[in-house]
Image: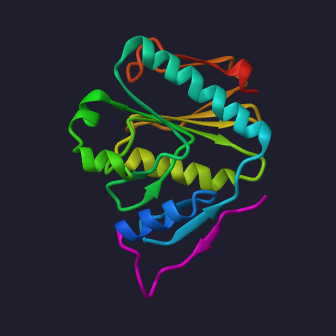
Amino acid sequence: MINPLEIKFDSCQLTDEQFYKLCQDNRDLRFERNSKGDMMIMAPTGGETSERNSEINFQLRLWNKQYKLGKVFESSGGFKLPNGADRSPDASWITLDKWNNLTLKQRQKFLPLCPDFVIELRSPSDSLKSLQEKMQEYIENGTKLGWLINRKDKQVEIYRQKKQVEILDNPTTLSGEDILPNFVLNLELIW
């Protein structure tokens, strides 16, 4: 298991603008920051995980094109969460209302909000515990529905507001419930 490289920023902090520029200057690297301002550098995913992420985003985007209820983002899109963390879920979605309330300037940088829906796909190098903590962070910052897809164990953890985490063993589909009406993710193409 390879954990992200964590760089502590106890004695100094990067501003949001400095962090954004660092990410732009190093587009081949994936950076995130926790709520304390410490930075994580994540390794790129392997081909198999990347292909599965692409399939997840395709299915989500196809649903969104049909229903036009929001905006879909892939793993290189950054979000500035209310707790100060900068995160980039593997797939995410926000309502049109949230998108329309952003200024043009805000749309150009990391979006200053928490997605309504997130998906994290566990790659072979990901720590399950760190992904679970990240999912909990999304929920605490306003995500309404989140899926942690663990291909290794063929399990999905479903995160919802004010509810216990639900664990499904080897499901073939997942429902977007009332957050993403009529969205069904076909997991047979992900496993």
Position of 153 with respect to 135 (left or right) is right
Residue at the image position 32 percent from the left and 55 percent from the top = 82
The quarter in which the N terminus is drawn is bottom right
Query: In the depicted view, which residue is nearer to us: 65 or 40?
Result: 65
State whether the magenta stretch is mostly helix, strand or loop. Answer: loop
Residue at the image position 44 percent from the left and 19 percent from the top = 64
Q: State the image quarter where residue 94 is shown.
A: top left
User: What is the image's colouring?
Assistant: rainbow
Position of 68 with respect to 137 (left or right) is left
Q: What residue span does the magenta drawing correspond to?
A: 1-15
Residue at the image position 64 percent from the left and 54 percent from the top = 129
Vertical order, 176 against 14 (above or below):
above
Q: Give percent across and percent down for residue 36.
A: 43, 71
Vertical order, 78 against 56 (above or below):
below
Which residue ends up furthest to the bottom in the rendered image? Answer: 11
The quarter in which the C terminus is drawn is top right
Position of 121 with respect to 175 (left or right) is right
Q: Give percent across and percent down for residue 79.
A: 41, 50
Residue 12 lies in the magenta-colored region: yes
Residue 8 lies in the magenta-colored region: yes
Which residue ends up furthest to the front in the rendered image? Answer: 25
Q: Is residue 141 visible?
A: no
Q: Is residue 65 visible?
A: yes
Vertical order, 124 against 146 (above or below):
below
Position of 29 with respect to 141 (left or right) is right
Q: State the image quarter where residue 177 is shown.
A: top left
Q: Give percent across and percent down for residue 95.
A: 32, 29
Query: In the depicted view, which residue is nearer to us: 11 or 57?
Result: 57
Residue at the image position 41 percent from the left and 15 percent from the top = 181
